[in-house]
Image (cartoon, grey):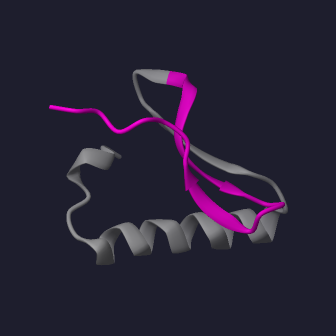
Amino acid sequence: MDLRELQGQMRVGVLCCLLRVIGRRLGEPVLVTAESDPLHPVLGFDVAADRVALLAEPELR
């Protein structure tokens, strides 16, 4: 998935909801990384905080 293609708050909300559901069910963090850079997550669900957080600085164009 290319996070740059997410357009609109509703679609971002759906993705965050999906990450929360998976993370809560597994009881583990869920990380989203760029396909070309799997070692540096950009978005993730934090189990302890029970929230989705941006893990990387937004790319400026």
Relative horizontal placement of residue 9, taking residue 15 as reference (left or right): left
Quadrant hosting residue 28? bottom right
Residue 15: image x %, image y %? 45, 66
Q: Looking at this view, is 55 or 38 the one in front?
A: 55
Q: Is residue 56 above or below residue 51?
A: above
Extent of the magenta region:
38-61
Tally of marks: 0
Q: Looking at this view, is 22 or 11 the one in front?
A: 11
Residue located 59% across and 63% down the image: 19
Residue located 77% across and 63% down the image: 49
Residue 52: image x %, image y %? 60, 61
Q: Is residue 41 magenta?
A: yes
Residue 55: image x %, image y %? 55, 41
Quarter of the figure with the C terminus? top left
Relative horizontal placement of residue 28, taking residue 2 as reference (left or right): right
Q: Is residue 29 magenta?
A: no
Residue located 65% across and 73% down the image: 21
Relative horizontal placement of residue 37, taking residue 19 as reference (left or right): left
Residue located 30% across and 43% down the image: 2
Q: Is residue 48 above or below residue 29?
A: below
